[in-house]
């Protein structure tokens, strides 16, 4: 992949958003930990230094080796990146006199600067830092200020090195995308050539070369990611792709049979495997979320290993891993960002399993996966399906897992999801589901007191799952769904609606 942009991650919560904005410009980019630079930087046309929760004045401040980048490639420092370039190169960074968080406006912008082409004084930007630059680094020229921040942006003369103390990647910075485009396209000369069609062509070609005549096993889930991965592999290797759809006992109501029917006519070689008892037995007594995830991941691997032995000469296991899975798991391998949760399809395979891993979607965000699927003329209903977690209902049942709890949640979930479809709300929601809470509450049904389960409904809107806002569903819809759940699902007497966004909450409860 040529014309790459490299983003060095210093642990900022916004690093993923930088990648999202760049991808929106039809430019391919990837995130690497600041302390794990690729050995070969030749394919990168530009480098961006992210923000960080750390202070450049701290003894343990992240300190990258920029010797192969500074002055040799166009570089943009964002927030921490800007302060790092100042602090260690002749400038001065100190604690700010005022808290510089939230909205601000550019009070001055240097004229005739390519970096700020189309951006005028008054443009809103988003600040998020407690340190500030007191003195510019050697050879720097001030490009912009705000009322409270004198050096909101600068560049280094004689280099294509730029720096800003605000975050262009967040929507609150109204001209942020334009600034990124100015830097990447007008200054760094990066081609805007990364499109869904080009991704399909490039990926299929790479898969053909990588896999040759080898046989590949793919675990289908019925969701967007594994389905798109399957179609890419099918284009590349045809009948050498062996798809397996596993019933882990934690799927939605009737999903095992419905999904198998869904793949009929797609030309895929699919086998259904009912391993529900195996998963539920392995999960018995386990209530810790991470332990549940890892148990499910282990059993998935065991099931695939069993099936692999039935496919003669199978050499690869394909997975629908996407970029947020990789990013959220990165610190498990030494990255600077905090691990949010482990993912069952990230991290490779155990030694006993003699299959190599192939992940066609590893560098895509969810919305990009959908666009790639659309470019291959896949069924819009399939591509529009809500994301569903790999561990299934196990992470929507808080606490230990039993067959009865699964039954209750499947019934609740079916009423909620079918209700969204019936009311024409399904496509307005990015992801929805129900959670079975580990509490019983007092209720009254007829003349009898009950002491039964409480369920929480969750519906969010998002573009890629990295951030999400709760959906303001109509009260009359919530009233109808709540009544249906309580009247039709034995064991539930209370329904609540989750109105928290991500961050600070995650989309799933575990």
Image (tube, rainbow, N blue to C red):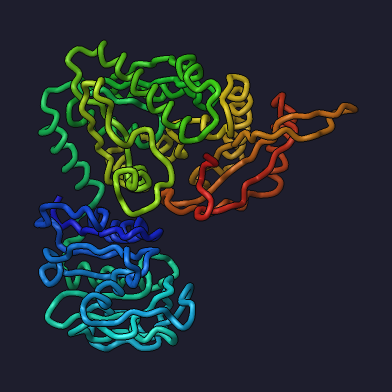
Q: Residue at x 45, y 39 (%)?
A: 387
- Tell me if residue 79 can be seen: no
Q: Is residue 203 left or right of residue 449?
A: left
Q: Is residue 192 above or below residue 79?
A: above
Q: Is residue 467 left or right of residue 253?
A: left
Residue 238 image point, x, y percent: 20, 24
Residue 71 image point, x, y percent: 12, 72
Which quadrant would residue 175 be assigned to in this image? bottom left
Residue 442 image point, x, y percent: 80, 34
Which quadrant would residue 447 be assigned to in this image? top right
Q: Is residue 438 left or right of residue 256?
A: right
Q: Is residue 122 above or below residue 51?
A: below
Q: Is residue 413 left or right of residue 314?
A: right
- Tell me if residue 487 can be seen: yes
The residue sitting at the right extreme is 447
Residue 250 image point, x, y percent: 50, 25
Q: Residue at x 46, y 77 (%)?
A: 100
The residue sitting at the front extreme is 59
How many marks on residues? 0
Q: Is residue 209 above or below residue 216?
A: below
Q: Residue at x 63, y 25 (%)?
A: 408
């Amino acid at each position: 992949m040529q014309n790459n942009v490299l983003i060095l991650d210093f642990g900022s919560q916004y690093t993923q958003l930088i990648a999202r904005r760049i991808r929106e410009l039809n430019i391919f980019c990837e995130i690497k930990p600041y302390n794990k630079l690729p050995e070969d930087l030749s394919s990168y046309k530009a480098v961006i230094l992210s923000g960080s929760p750390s202070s450049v004045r701290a003894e343990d401040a992240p300190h990258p080796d920029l010797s192969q980048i500074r002055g040799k490639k166009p570089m943009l420092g964002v927030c921490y990146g800007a302060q790092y370039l100042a602090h260690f190169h002749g400038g001065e960074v100190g604690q700010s006199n005022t808290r510089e968080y939230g909205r601000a406006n550019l009070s001055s912008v240097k004229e005739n600067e390519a970096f700020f082409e189309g951006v005028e004084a008054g443009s809103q930007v988003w600040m998020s830092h407690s340190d500030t630059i007191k003195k510019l680094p050697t050879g720097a020229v001030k490009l912009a200020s705000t009322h409270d921040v004198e050096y909101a942006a600068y560049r280094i003369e004689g280099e294509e090195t730029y720096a800003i103390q605000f975050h262009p990647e967040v929507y609150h910075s109204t001209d942020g995308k334009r600034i990124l485009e100015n830097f990447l396209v007008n200054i760094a000369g990066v081609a805007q050539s990364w499109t869904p069609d080009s991704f399909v062509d490039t990926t299929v070609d790479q898969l053909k070369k990588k896999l040759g005549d080898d046989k590949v096993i793919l675990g289908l889930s019925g969701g967007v990611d594994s389905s798109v991965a399957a179609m890419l592999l099918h284009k590349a290797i045809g009948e050498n792709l062996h798809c397996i759809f596993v019933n882990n006992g934690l799927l939605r109501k009737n999903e095992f049979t419905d999904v198998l029917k869904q793949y009929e006519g797609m030309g895929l070689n699919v086998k259904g495997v009912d391993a529900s008892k195996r998963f539920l037995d392995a999960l018995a007594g386990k209530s810790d979320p991470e332990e549940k995830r890892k148990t499910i991941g282990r059993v998935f691997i065991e099931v695939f290993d069993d099936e692999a032995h039935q496919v003669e000469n199978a050499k690869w296991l394909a997975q629908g891993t996407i970029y947020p899975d990789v990013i959220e798991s990165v610190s498990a391998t030494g990255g600077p960002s905090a691990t949010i949760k482990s993912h069952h399809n990230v991290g490779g395979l155990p030694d006993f399993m003699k299959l190599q891993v192939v992940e066609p979607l590893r560098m895509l965000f969810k919305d990009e996966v959908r666009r790639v699927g659309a470019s291959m003329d896949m069924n819009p209903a399939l591509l529009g399906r809500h994301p569903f977690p790999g561990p299934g209902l196990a992470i929507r049942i808080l606490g230990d897992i039993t067959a009865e709890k699964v039954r209750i949640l499947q019934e609740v979930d079916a009423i909620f999801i079918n209700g969204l479809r019936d009311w024409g709300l399904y496509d307005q929601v990015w992801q929805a589901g129900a959670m079975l809470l580990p509490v019983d509450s007092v209720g009254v049904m007829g003349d009898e007191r009950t002491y039964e389960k409480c369920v929480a409904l969750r519906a969010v809107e998002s573009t890629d799952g990295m951030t999400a806002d709760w959906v303001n569903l109509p009260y009359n819809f919530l009233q109808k769904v709540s009544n249906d759940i309580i009247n039709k699902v034995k064991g539930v007497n209370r329904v609540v609606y989750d109105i928290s966004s991500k961050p600070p909450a995650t989309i799933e409860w575990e």
